[in-house]
């Protein structure tokens, strides 16, 4: 019985290590706009990303659940600030090191997109990546 428990533990540990939770944050129902020069997000070695999905009605959805823009981004800013404090050289007034990846539907009104960007900037997020599909 002990070898089976050991094997099950090893398999469980393996799958916990290789699971990619960032892919679960992507809303695949969005129809991203097409741009001829679209390319992958360049994080410059940075691993912290905040992925925001905005549907055609302008609703912010995280893991398929609608969220209030201002309160959600403020909560993410607090979490990012906690992890940034552990980074050597980061000071309290500096911008947050997290890159905000905005995945907006092609039919999203500009005012909804602008609302999300303003809320991010008010919470010290200044690095953005707008996602689109390549032609």
Image: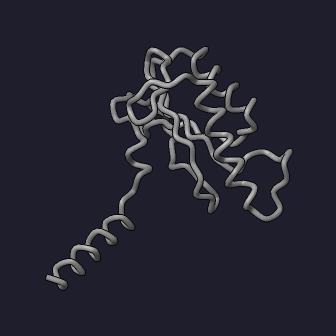
Of 80 and 121, the residue lying toward us: 80
Query: Which quadrant, please, contains the N terminus?
Result: bottom left
Taking the spot 33% from the left edge, 30% from the top edge, the residue there is 29
Residue 61: image x %, image y %?
A: 45, 28
Dividing the picture into quadrants, the one containing residue 6 is bottom left
The residue most toward the left is: 1
The residue most toward the front is: 1
Dividing the picture into quadrants, the one containing residue 133 is top left
Dividing the picture into quadrants, the one containing residue 116 is top right
Taking the spot 38% from the left edge, 45% from the top edge, the residue there is 24
Q: Is residue 9 left or right of residue 133?
A: left
Up the image or down, 117 lies above or below 135; here it is above
Residue 8: image x %, image y %?
A: 22, 73
Total label count? 0
Query: Which quadrant, please, contains the C terminus?
Result: top left
The residue most toward the bottom is: 3
Up the image or down, 4 lies above or below 87; here it is below
Of 110 and 21, the residue lying toward us: 21
Of 56 and 98, the residue lying toward us: 98
Up the image or down, 8 lies above or below 107; here it is below
Taking the spot 75% from the left edge, 38% from the top edge, the residue there is 124
Residue 51: image x %, image y %?
A: 52, 40
Give the color scheme: rainbow, by chain, secondary structure or one colour.
one colour
Residue 73: image x %, image y %?
A: 62, 32
Of 126 and 69, the residue lying toward us: 69
């Amino acid at each position: 019985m002990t070898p089976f428990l050991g094997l099950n533990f090893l398999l469980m540990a393996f799958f916990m290590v290789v699971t990619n939770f960032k892919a679960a944050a992507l809303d695949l129902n969005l129809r991203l706009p097409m741009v001829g020069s679209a390319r992958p997000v360049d994080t410059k070695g940075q691993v912290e990303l905040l992925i925001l999905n905005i549907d055609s009605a302008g609703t912010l959805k995280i893991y398929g659940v609608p969220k209030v823009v201002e309160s959600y981004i403020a909560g993410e800013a607090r979490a990012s600030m906690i992890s940034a404090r552990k980074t050597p050289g980061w000071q309290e007034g500096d911008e947050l090191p997290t890159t905000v990846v905005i995945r907006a539907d092609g039919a999203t009104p500009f005012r909804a997109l602008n609302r999300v960007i303003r809320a991010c900037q008010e919470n010290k997020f200044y690095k953005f990546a707008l996602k689109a599909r390549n032609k």
